[in-house]
Image: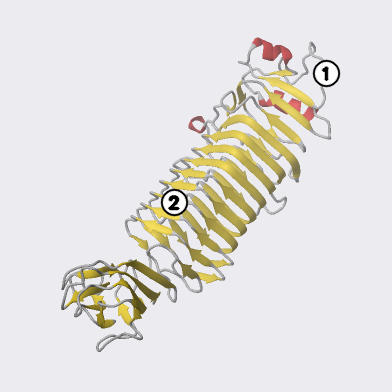
Amino acid sequence: MTGGLHNPAHPVRTATLVVAASNASALAKAEADYVCDGVADNVQIQAAIDALPASGGKVLLSEGTFTIAAAISIANRLILQGQGRDNTKIIQVAAAGGVNLIINGSGTTLGQVQIRSLTLDGNKTNCTVGKGIDGSGFQGFTLTDIRIQNTVEEGLYGAGAVPQSKNWFLYDVVIAASGTVGTPKDNFYWANGAGLAAFGFYSLTATKSGVQLASCNEVTLVNCWIDQCTLYGISLDTVGQTSVADCYIAANGDNGIYLSGTCTNMRVHDNLSYMNTAAGLYVSGTVNDGLIHHNQLKDNSGWGWRAPGVTFARTLIDHNVAQNNTSGNWSTTELGTGGTYRDNDVLIGPGEIRVASGALIAGLANAYAFNWQNPHASKILIKRVMIYLGTAGGTGTSVLDVGKAASTATHDDTLIDGLDLNTTGVFDNINDAGTNGKSRQLVDENGGTNDWVTGQILVANASNLVGRYEIEYVGV
């Protein structure tokens, strides 16, 4: 039936009302409380919402397409549910202007709202304005099995300090193609909010950023996929108590992950930021009490990592991997101040201590028992070289010289000079330095003039040699 009037052939329900699309099956229409006409279906949907008791209830939409000419205004304690996002679609009518599809029309706080199992389509080719969901003021808001697409403005939006958006839960939500070339918009924009958890969230092909969070607290993004957005993948501006984890952020038009403003109690960990146009992870501003851990920053067109002018306080940057980035993996001149860098693949932070280890190779006179190259993009200070001889070399006059060198074929004895290889035991460059050996050496950055430490067998063969070397060094 049409016009928002209740179907007289159907028994009156109260807390659950059914709305059938104009192209729904005959059975769905027969069982519905309201039947849409396909022209302004917001009338019937809104009538069902308004007819629910004050204690709340459910509006169940049939399969089919609902064409709306005005926004659907959500009520307290409402469940709006379709038959699956591939079966139920709400689309904006082609119009010279346009509307937001779903709104908080009260201007006050709305609580305990759930929207499930449908697609929202903004029909941006034929409209000039309109968000998918403007949830400003929604508190206790759940979205599950939802697709939001083709909106002129943001697909999902929540902003404004009064009333504040709070306690949102997103699961299995896809937002795609928000904004236009003339008015670029984020797929998901959330500002001044508190309490957001998104799991299995997809944000694709936005004309601006995939996710933009500003002045928010208590946010968790886990197992999210952010792909092919025109600006940033995930942008976090002045956020607190926020975690971004196990996310795939790829092929976006600027930085994959961008932190700005003052961020406090941040956790950014176990993400893959891949093939973005700028940096994999770019930090600016201030980060307090942060952990940036175990991220993979790979194949980006800019740097893997940049933190120009950043002030870190009580922030650990550790176990991150940056590989195959066009501008470089780590911008060592842009590490900021105050952060603790530890165990980040090829980056060694100032004051960070590491140990390299390997097996000695038996060989003839003038062969090399080991060659080790500084893997880092900055200079290092060799503190100690330890040599363990488990099996003697086999020739009485065989010795080992160890020192920094320009290549694998360069002899040097500035760390250990003339160590007897026809013996067993543990030796180092402090107690067993020999004539030319020293207790420390500065080694150039990877690719520099002297970026190797070599250990050469001299005078006689060491064909039976078995042992190991350990190099303890510190970043400078």
In this rendering, the answer to whether 34 lies above or below 382 is above
Instruction: Please give the residue where the numbered disc 2 appears in the rendered image.
Output: 273
- Residue 374 position within the rendered picture, expressed as x and y whole percent measured from the top left: 31, 69
Sequence order check: which comes first, mark 1 or mark 2? 1
Q: Residue at x 55, y 62 (%)?
A: 291
- Residue depicted at 77% across the width and 15% down the height: 7
Q: Residue at x 46, y 61 (%)?
A: 319
The quadrant in which residue 171 appears is: top right
Eye-nearest disc, 1 or 2? 2
Going by the numbered disc 1, the residue's amino acid type is Val
Q: Nearer the viewer, residue 226 or 189?
A: 226
Q: Is residue 137 left or right of residue 259?
A: right
Q: Which residue is mark 1?
A: 12
Tell me: 294 left or right of 444: right
**Disc 2 marks which amino acid?**
Ser
Q: Residues within 10 Å of mark 1 (few under 14, many from 20)?
A: few
Instruction: Classify residue 397 by image quadrant.
Output: bottom left
